[in-house]
Amino acid sequence: MDIKKLLVELTLEEKAALLSGVDFMYTNPVPRLSIPSVRMSDGPHGLRVQKEGGDNGVNGSEPATCFPTAASTASSWNPENTYKMGEAIAEEALHYGINILLGPGACIKRNPLCGRNFEYFSEDPLLAGKMAAAEVNGVQSRNVGVSVKHFALNNAENFRFMGDSVCDMRAIREIYLKVFEIIVKESKPHTMMCAYNKINGEYCCENKWLLTDVLRNEWGFDGVVMSDWGATHDRVKGVAAGLDLEMPGDTAICRKWIIDSAKDGTLKKEELDKSVENILRLVKRYENNPKETAVDWEAHNALAAEIAEDCAVLLKNDGMLPLSKSERLFVVGDLFEKMRYQGAGSSMINPTYLSTTKTAFDENKIAYEFCRGYAENNLEPDEKLISEAITKAKGYDSVLVFAGLTDYVESEGADRENMKLPANQLALIDALMKTGKKTIIVLYGGSPMELPFADKVSAILNMYLPGQNGGTATYNLLFGVKSPCGKLAETWVKSYADVPLGKYFSKTVNEIYKESIFVGYRYYLTANKEVRYPFGYGLSYTKFNYSDMQVTESDAEYKVSCEIVNNGKYDGAEIVQLYVKAPQGVFKPVKELKGFAKIYLKAGESKKIEIVVKKDDLRYWNAKENRPVTESGKYELQLCS
Ligand code: BGC
C-alpha cells in the first residue's frame, strides 16, 4: 500500500468516509483503491466478536477465552500475566480476523463505586500503567492492535455521555494522565480510544491539548485516535483537534460536515490529510496478518486459571485455610454454582469453557453438602433459603460461604449505588454468624465491598472476577494446591463514608475532583484514616523475610535491592513494593509507589530482587511552571510487604 500515492488519489468523499466506521466494528473500506476495512472487537480481557450482521448485543458473539478482568489481574502485580493474556487474546483475534482489540481499560479508580472499575486496574497510575502496557505489548507482539481506553478522566458512569471531569492540572498530570503516559511510552499502542466525557469543559473528542499537544507532541504517540462509541459531537473540531476516527459511524451528518468544511477551508487540508494518513497507516499495519490461524483453546483455558490463581487476594486467615480434603464441607451461597467471573456490558464474553467452583469441587471429588442461601438474581433476603442453610449448618463446625457482587449491582453504564453486598447475602451471613460456626468467605465481584463481618469470620479469600476458569483457581487456592499471592491494587475502606468526597460522587454532570492528587491510598495514608484493607495488602499461606536492603545511585536512577526468603511451609510468591517518601515543601502524599517486583520462591528458598527508580519519576507536576520539577531535600525509600 503506497500511502503517499493514495493521499493523492482519494477523493474528498472517500477521505471523509475513511474517517468513520461503517458499522459497529468495521472502518469504512474504499474498494475502488483496494483499501480494506479494519475490524475491531471488544475487549479488554477477551474477545467479543460479533457474528456477521451482529447488533453489538452480547448474545451473538463467537466463543472466546474469558480471562480474569483487570481488577483481578492488577492484584497479581505481575505484568507477565497481562503480557501472556495479551498474546493469547491476539492469537484468538487472528483466528477471527480481528485487527484491533478494544482495550485495555486504564482509567484510574478514583471512587470505588464507578461501574466500570471491574475492567480498570488500579487507583495507582504506576501499577495500572505497567499492567496495561504489558497487555498492550502482549497483544501487539502478534501484530494485533489495541485501543487503550478511555482517554481520559473517564472515572464515573452515571453521566457517561455528557459528564464533565473538573480537575486541577497537577492531579491530571500526576494521576490521571500518568497512567496513559506510561502506556504510550512503554508500549506504543496502535490506537487510543477517546472518552465520552469532557475535561474542564471541553469534550475529550474535541480537545486539542489532550489529543495533539500532550498525546502526540509530548508523548510521541503515532497511531490513530478513535472516539468511544458515539462520543463525537463537533466532528470538524474533532478532526482539527486530533480525533482521527469516529466510531461506530456511519453518521451522514458528520461526513457532510467534514466535506463542507474541507471545501470552505474551515478544515485545513493538512488537518484532514493527517488523519487520513493515520488511518491508512493503520490499515497497512495489518495487511499481511495471517488469516484464520489455529488456536489452542485448552491452553488458553489453562492460562486463564493460572492467571486467576496469581491474582486472588487472601484478605484474612486465622488458620482455617487451606482446607483439608478429608473433611466433609458445608457450602452455602448461590455464587458457588453461579460463580460470577466477568463484568457486565461491552466486555461480556461468550466463554469457550466454564469452570465454576462447583464444577471444580466435583471434578476433584470434594465431599460437601450445598445450600443456596440466597438467589443470585434477586436482592431481597429469602427466609426459606436462609433457614434451610441455618438448619443444615447444625451438622457442621464450619461453613464455606460464597458471596459477592452480581450483575444486578455492578455494570458498565451505571455507578454502584453503594458499597454493600446485596441485602440477601448480608442477611444470610448475619444469620450464619449467629450460629457461632467458623465461617470462611469467598468473594467474587469487580470492586471493593463493605465487609461488616470481617472481624468475626475466620477467613476471606477475594477472587475478584477470575474469568472462565476461575473455579479451578478457587479450588486450588482453597485447598492449598497453590498459595494465594495477590495484593490489593486498590484500597478497601471500612465504610463508604470514609471515601473522600464520596457523597458527591456521580451525582451531577459536573464531577469535581476536589481531592486533587489525594486519590486512593494517597488520601487514606496522608489523612491517617484507618481502612479495612490497604492498597498493597494481601496474605499468603507462607511467610517471607526481607534483609540486606541496598541502594545504589547513578546519574539517572536508583537501584534498590533486597534479599527475600520464603521461610514458611508452602511455595509462594511475594510482591515487594517500593514507596518513596518525598520532601513536603510542596504538599504531597506521605508516600507513593515508585516500583514493585514479584518473586516466586519455593519453601525455604531465597533470592535477591532489584527495583529501579528513575530520578525523573520522583518529580511532581509544578502547575505554575507547567512542567515536572524535582523538589530538593531528603527522599526516603521504603521497601514494603
Ligand atoms: C464502551 C467502550 C466499548 C465500545 C464498543 C462503548 O460504549 O464505552 O468501552 O469498547 O462501546 O462496544
Image (spheres, helix red, strand yellow):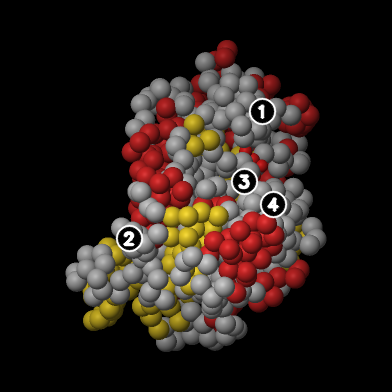
Residue at image coords 36%, 55%: 476
Q: Earlier in the sequence, mark 4 or mark 2?
A: 2
- Cβ at disc 4 under 8 Å from ligand 1: no
Q: Which residue is mark 2?
A: 326
Q: Which residue is mark 3?
A: 344
Disc 1 crowd, CA 10 A, few/some/many (<14, 14-19, 20+)? some
Mark 2 → mark 3, Cα distance in angstroms: 37 Å
Labels 2 and 1: the sequence-earlier one: 1
Mark 1 = which residue?
Answer: 55
Q: Give the foreground label among 2 and 1.
A: 2
Q: Nearer the viewer, residue 495 or 280?
A: 495
Q: Nearer the viewer, mark 1 or mark 4?
A: 4
Residue 504 or residue 182, whichever sits in front:
504
Q: Residue 378 shows which numbered tag?
A: 4
Give neighbour class at mark 4: few <14, some 14-19, many 20+ (Cα, 10 Å). some
Q: Residue at x 62, y 69 (%)?
A: 431
Q: Secondary structure at mark 2?
A: loop
Q: Earlier in the sequence, mark 1 or mark 4?
A: 1
Q: Amino acid at mark 3?
A: Ala
Three-letter amino acid code at the position of disc 2? Ser
Question: Given the image, on which type of amino acid does mark 4 rest?
Answer: Asn
Residue 225 visible in the snapshot: no
* Type of the residue with mark 1: Asp
The quarter of the picture where the C terminus appears is: bottom left
Residue 480 visible somewhere in the drawing: yes
Circles 4 and 2, Cβ within 8 Å, touching? The answer is: no
Q: Where does residue 629 sit, x and y in percent of width and height?
A: 51, 74
Q: Secondary structure at mark 4?
A: loop
The image quarter containing residue 564 is bottom left
